[in-house]
Image (cartoon, rainbow, N blue to C red):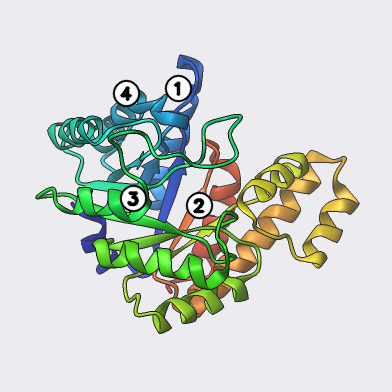
Amino acid sequence: MKIIDKLALARPAFSLEFFPPKDQAGVDQLFETVRALAPYSPTYVSVTWGAGGSTRGLTIDLVRRIKREAGIEAMAHLTCVGATREEIDGILDQLVEAGIENVLALRGDPPRGESRFVKTEGGFGSGAELVAAVRARPGLSVAAACYPETHPEAESPEADLRHLAAKARAGADFLVSQLFFDNEDYFRFVDRARGAGISCPIIAGIWPITNVAQIRRITGLCGARIPPALQAKLDEVKDDPEKVRAVGVEHATAQCRELVRRGVPGIHFYTLNRSRATVDILEALRADGPT
């Protein structure tokens, strides 16, 4: 089923993001996580695309298995990096043959060691171009990414919003946001997007912090900021992993409660292939009662 149709039925939707593991032990861990989270009835899950398409075969296999074995709708990430249009066309063929109906179309990050995205000869030069290519495929629904705090490579917030509007015009059914830790950043961004004529649902991306060094690295890459009050709490407990996890889960739960109260269409959890933090958050939300 197309995710855009499921979003019309489930408000708010809850979804989960996984990445392709490096070995069989990692795959086993991922499916343990899927089984642990399945009772919470996620609207869909997504599986990321390795740098330069390095995990393309595994990504396709994982979305196929999750959909068939777990009975959860699955969406494959797809990027422009290192692939020609013909290669992308072949990947879309594989997804359709596997029964996958949903694709998250991304420009993709520059290859490791490079600071800027360079269009592959014969490939796509932007996320909007890839969105249009997926949109042209009968039977496929396409989503795109957005940055509440502005893409780190964008010349300005206005320029970033123009790029996002191009993806919406190209046919993106819905948007999934980069992680953020201050809900006002998300709501201000949604207001700006609506003002720019972007009307599709904007799913909120939530990252439950469980590791201080890790989140510093991630926010450094994506340009997200950690609010001073949250940073102070993390600094106090940075040497105690359990206390760090508790602070991260508490903050993410508070974020989710407010997002739900204010009518967010969906929340997308960046799980890192682990279930514990997300389960804790979903249990807290479940205890709040029907939304």
Give the side of residue 88 with respect to residue 16, left or right: left
Closer mark to the observer between disc 2 and disc 1: 2
Q: Residue at x 64, y 46 (%)?
A: 221
Please tell me in which quadrant of the rendered image residue 82 appears. Answer: top left
The quarter of the displayed image where residue 38 is located? top left
Residue type at mark 1: give it: Asp
Q: Which residue is mark 4?
A: 57
Please give the name of the residue rendered at 23% of the width and 32% of the height, measured from the top-left corner: 91
Q: Quick one: SS at disc 2?
A: strand
Name the residue nearer the viewer: 267 or 150.
150
State the separation of the CA atoms marked 4 and 1: 17 Å
Residue closest to the far left? 138
Asked if residue 254 shows in the view, the reply is yes
**Label 2 amino acid?**
Phe
Separation of residues labelled 3 and 1 (CA atoms): 20 Å
Residue density around tag 2, few if under 14, some if 14–19, many if 20 or more, within 10 Å: many
Disc 3 marks which residue?
44
Lower position in the chain sequence, tag 2 or tag 4: 4
> Relative to 142, is 278 on the left or the right?
right
Q: Is residue 135 above or below residue 227?
A: above
Residue 42 in view (yes/no): no
> Furthest-right residue in view?
236
Residue located 33% across and 31% down the image: 83
Query: What label sits on residue 28 in the rendered view?
Result: 1
Mark 3 and mark 2: span between their CA atoms?
11 Å
- Is 216 above or below relative to 121? below
Kindly report which numbered mark, 2 or 4, lies closer to the viewer in this rendering. 4
